[in-house]
Image (spheres, helix red, strand yellow):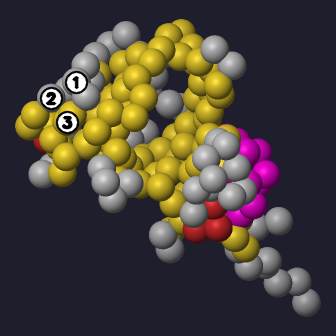
C-alpha cells in the first residue's frame, strides 16, 4: 500500500535547491514557493523565496562562513510590516527602533537581482538594502527596488526547522 512520505528536516542542499512550485513545511504550515529572487553583490549571492506576496512572507537562504551556522547556511524567515512601525531611524541610519525593539546595522549595500515567478518586484535590476539585528538576533530589513523602501521583520531559523518531502 502506498503511503505519502512524511516530511523530514531539510538539509542545506535541500534549501539551496528550493524553487518555484516547491512545497515545504515550516511552523506547522505548508508553504508553496511562488517566486524567487536571486541577488548578487560583487560575488556574494543569496536567494529570497516568495511564499505569500500579499502578506510579503519570504524565506531567505544565504551561504555563510559564520561559525554560528555549522552547515554553512543562514536561513531566515521574513514578513513585511508597515513602515510606520519604525519610530526611530531608517535605512540610512546605524540604529533603528521598530515595533519597540532596537536594531543595529549589520550591513548596507546594493545588489543586482533577477526574478522568476511572482515576487511583487520588478523583473530584475538593482536593489538597495540595509540589514539590522537586535542583541537577541531578531532581524529588520529594508529593501528598495526603485519604488521606495519596503520594511520587513525576520528571525533566523535552523535549517532543520524547514521540513521537505523527498
Q: Which mark is residue 96?
A: 3
Q: Which residue is at a point 50% across and 11% down the rendered structure image?
A: 126
Q: Which residue is mark 1?
A: 93
Q: Is residue 24 above or below residue 80?
A: below
Proximity of marks 2 and 3: CB atoms separated by less than 8 Å: yes
- How many residues crowd mark 3 within 10 Å: few (<14), some (14–19), many (20+)? many
Residue 115 rendering spot, x and y as whole percentages: 60, 23
* Residue found farthest to the left: 87
Proximity of marks 1 and 2: CB atoms separated by less than 8 Å: yes
Proximity of marks 1 and 3: CB atoms separated by less than 8 Å: yes
* Residue found farthest to the front: 67
Of the pair 13 and 49, the residue shown nearer to us: 13
Indicate the quadrant where residue 25 lies: bottom right
Q: Secondary structure at mark 2?
A: loop
Instruction: Please say whether residue 31 is visible from this viewpoint.
Output: yes
Q: Which mark is residue 58?
A: none
Amino acid at each position: 500500500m502506498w503511503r505519502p512520505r512524511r516530511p523530514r528536516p531539510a538539509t542545506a542542499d535541500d534549501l539551496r535547491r528550493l524553487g518555484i512550485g516547491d512545497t515545504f513545511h515550516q511552523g506547522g504550515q505548508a508553504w508553496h514557493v511562488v517566486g524567487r529572487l536571486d541577488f548578487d553583490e560583487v560575488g556574494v549571492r543569496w536567494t529570497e523565496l516568495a511564499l505569500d506576496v500579499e502578506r510579503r512572507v519570504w524565506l531567505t537562504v544565504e551561504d555563510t562562513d559564520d561559525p554560528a551556522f555549522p552547515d554553512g547556511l543562514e536561513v531566515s524567515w521574513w514578513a513585511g510590516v508597515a513602515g510606520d512601525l519604525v519610530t526611530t531611524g531608517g535605512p540610512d541610519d546605524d540604529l533603528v527602533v521598530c515595533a519597540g525593539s532596537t536594531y543595529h546595522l549589520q550591513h548596507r549595500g546594493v545588489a543586482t537581482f533577477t526574478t522568476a515567478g511572482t515576487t511583487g518586484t520588478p523583473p530584475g535590476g538593482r536593489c538597495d538594502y540595509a540589514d539590522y539585528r537586535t542583541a537577541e538576533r531578531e532581524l529588520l530589513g529594508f529593501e528598495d527596488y526603485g519604488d521606495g523602501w519596503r520594511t520587513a521583520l525576520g528571525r533566523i531559523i535552523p535549517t532543520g526547522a524547514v521540513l521537505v518531502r523527498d
